[in-house]
Amino acid sequence: MSKLWGGRFTKETNKLVEELTASISFDQKLAKEDIQGSLAHVKMLGEQGIISTEDAETIADGLQKVGKKLENSELEYSVANEDIHMNIEKFLIDEIGPVGGKLHTGRSRNDQVATDMHLYLKNHTEEIITLVESVQGAILEQAEKNVDTLIPGYTHLQRAQPVSFAHHLMAYFWMLERDKGRLVDSLERVNWLPLGAGALAGTTFPINRERTAELLGFEHVYPNSMDAVSDRDFILEFLSTASIMMMHISRLSEELVIWSSQEFQFIELDDSFCTGSSIMPQKKNPDVPELLRAKTGRVYGNLMGLLTVLKGLPLAYNKDMQEDKEGMFDTVETIEGSLKLLAPMMETMVVNHDKMREATSQDYSNATDIADYLVTKGLPFRDAHEVIGKIVLHAIDQKKFLLDLKLEEYKEFSTLFEEDIYSVLTPDNVVAARDSYGGTGQKQVLKQIELGKETLKK
């Protein structure tokens, strides 16, 4: 098939130019969406009388046959046909003859590719939302089992206060819930139809864009044809949301790596999510969370890449926009792959309850509770803070923990101390005492888990 645009030219395209400008090597991922958009377009053309009903039906039948070959992996794409649109048109004409050329009536590759990408992101955003919920479900499952499991809570990667392990895990549940909210919200921008905008100025044919939108499940139609073909905000928004989500996945992955180390031994990851060493037979490496952590960089890069491509473009469509697809495809595949691994990895994670509890009883993370204790006895908090600082220093000098100190030692620093200080300082009571809304007290954590379940049901 000669070039769709070849009538204006007297020379064949330089082969190197053809290779540079062709996008079929990657935009073939849009084949399903391209056929989907074309089926809606040709139906509208027939209904509007722009082409005959017979031709519209013939083209639709041909597209269905091409779609079936796509499902059976029988299509062989050609660089000579440049992109997915011209390749699909070539397959169509091979199926039904020259009448297939009428499909392109009233549209341009500019509005066609934008439509394909809207459809692609619409489909995959909904899939990603489902995958996020599967990870949230795995987190909830582990949280329910570990409400009474205690773990040191950290700030500055220094032990700060003991917390319920379920509370720690649920922090990631809510991070992912915000990610999911951003994805749901982004669908509002994805649900706009560009098709019918033409190359940039609309078309002379009496098309019905609202009908096409209805057929494709779009809620809105772009009111400005130039904006329709040049808008890539919906992709940027997805890449931005994906970057934030990968940051959350990376933070969780970092903790899984730390917790599974010999130094911590808080958890053990299932063998199916780890690998060994080619030289050190004792090793069990947490490769999956390490790679999830690393893949954050490529998602960030895809966002920055597209921002840079778009930053200086005049209206309307420019060939630069061909660079909008690979990063989008890569991010979708990275996010989907990460979530598919994260859910079962969290489900099969083994928690070392004893090791975690041991850690909470061999530090000074209950010091704040002594300050609170003194405040309830009438001592101003700032004075109490100073008293506790001196007690901790004394305990460190004596190579003791706070529960090991005798009451006489406490009274050396304040006469307000009584025997009940030991009950206050036990890790279970330290955690239970934080019964404020959103706190780590077991009652509040149980409420949080129930809220999480209700949130997932919505």
Image: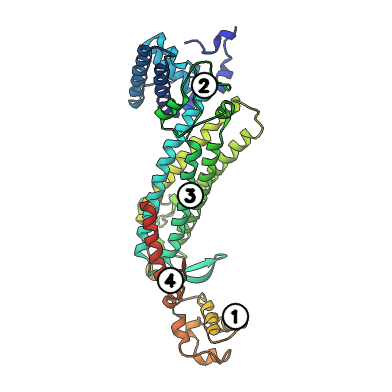
The scheme the figure's colours follow is rainbow
Q: Disc 2 or 1, which lies upstream in sequence?
A: 2
Report the disc number at residue 381: 1
Dot 3 lies on which element? helix
Q: Residue at x 50, y 42 (%)?
A: 186
Q: Which residue is mark 3?
A: 179
Q: Position of residue 31 (x, y in %)?
A: 42, 26
Mark 4 element type: loop
Estimate the x, y position of residue 128 in percent, counting from the top left: 42, 43
For residue 57, side relative to residue 4 (left or right)? left
Q: Nearer the viewer, residue 19 or 416?
A: 416
Name which of mark 3 and mark 1 comes first in the sequence.
Answer: 3
* Disc 2 residue type (three-letter): Arg
Q: Amino acid at mark 3?
A: Asp
**Mark 4 — residue?**
441
Q: Which mark is residue 135?
A: none
Picture layout, residue 212 above or below residue 350: above
Give the distance between the C-alpha atoms of the residues marked 2 and 1, in whole angstroms.
69 Å
**What residue is disc 2 on?**
109
